[in-house]
Image: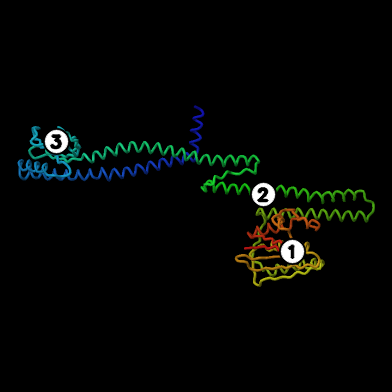
Amino acid sequence: MRALRGVVHRMRRSLTFRLALTYVGLFLGSLLSLCGAAFWLSVHRPMQEELGIVAAEADTLARIDAAHGRPALIEALQRRVRKREETVAFHALIASDGEAITANLPSWPRKPITHSIRLEADVFENGIEHDEEALVVERALSDGARLIVGRDVEMLADRERLFAQGALWLGGAAILLTIIGGFAMSRAVGMRLDAINRTARRVMEGDLHERIAIRGSGDDFDDLAITLNGMLARIEDLMESVRRVSDNIAHELRTPLARLHADLDELRRAADAQERETLVEQAIDEAARLRAVFDALLKIARIESGRHAAGLRAIDLAALLADAVEFHQPEAESHGQSIVTEIEPGLALCADPDLIFQAVSNLLDNAIKYGGVGGHILVTADRSGACTRIAVSDDGPGILPEHVTRVTERFFRAPNAVLQPGTGLGLSLVAAIVSFHRGKLVIVPAAAGTRVEMLLP
């Protein structure tokens, strides 16, 4: 009994069960409406038309009695019976003392009929009984006699009984089928939802590889499963990225911290002033590198979390790029490199100028660092559809295709770049800035050289 109450309680709380009950109610309501309309058209309305005909005939016969006397009324009643019509005409003329003057109704009520009623009016013909039902009305005549006039409505009565029986059976069958269908629908939907819930619980327990089964039916639940599976795959990728970033942070910080600790330890024991100065400078350099790493991480985190106070405004892109090139020109010249610009005139951009300058500066810094001695660097800016495209190209060793998807990860450095100084955060910061401006970062690898494009709306 307790288990049954538990099942009932769960069913009452189930949205699918409530939807199934709503479906049952709507279906039964629609069925009753259709049956009611059919009954009104095929039974009730024809019965009212017959009642109107009978009442009109009764009024006409009563006027004949008042105008021409009783013999004329009797003659009119006989003619009415002899007339060949689709429905049998019934009547009963009863004197004031209760004696029947003329009648073809087998029986009638003793009390006057105030409204219309239906009477059994079975007819015997050649020894065979024919079931008939008469719809009758009564008119009181001037001498106290009763005039009952009616017509056969057996066909309509049969139709009415058929409707009553059919409605009973159809209603019962409809209730049973809709309840069964509602339970089946509730069970089918519940099973799909249970599968999603089970998968979600396993993911919550730490199994990020779990996915919702797709039946291949192409229904709404398959669409939902595909969307949720995509979300789970993205979460798994992000968690893996977080794990890699954590490992990289630990690796990247361990070396400068170890060097800083060693320098400070040697500084404590050093006696020579020159040696002490050298160790202090090394310690300062390591501390500066650590600070640069933390500053870059904090900036990326602030930008990606939306906590950066955006100073969006219209900027002259040509002037901004010229300033960035001028800032890096001395470093490029020290490597024997040349920087060439191809900037479409009249370009304007609504953006944060400090962030755009930072992104371009990082790209130029990478191009100088990895472009090689005597290399060429090209800075371009033009319109690309609804976007403004800023690109920085170099003719260095380039990025291997298999590393393109990872170069924007924090601390990731391609094997051919590990010997160059850097933190592995430059392109991560560029990607965060481009995403902040709702743009797209495109990296085009090549056998010799790399082209990095920022597409900004």
> Which callout, 3 or 2, points to the residue nearer the camera?
3
Left or right: residue 297 compared with residue 178: right
Q: Earlier in the sequence, mark 3 or mark 2?
A: 3
Q: Which residue is mark 1?
A: 449
- Give the farthest residue toward the bottom: 345
Q: Which residue is mark 3?
A: 125
The kind of secondary structure element at disc 3 is strand
Q: Earlier in the sequence, mark 1 or mark 3?
A: 3
- Is 242 located above or below residue 18 in the figure? below
Q: How many marks?
A: 3
State the image coordinates of residue 100 (x, y, percent, origin top left): 9, 34
Label 1 vs label 2: CA separation?
Answer: 30 Å
Label 1 vs label 3: CA separation?
Answer: 114 Å
Residue type highlighted by circle 2: Leu
- Give the farthest residue toward the right: 272
The kind of secondary structure element at disc 2 is helix
Residue 344 falls in image quadrant: bottom right
Query: Are circles 3 and 2 on residues that touch, CB within 8 Å?
Result: no
Residue type highlighted by circle 3: Glu
> Which callout, 1 or 2, points to the residue nearer the camera?
1
Label 3 vs label 2: CA separation?
Answer: 95 Å
Q: Which residue is mark 2?
A: 238
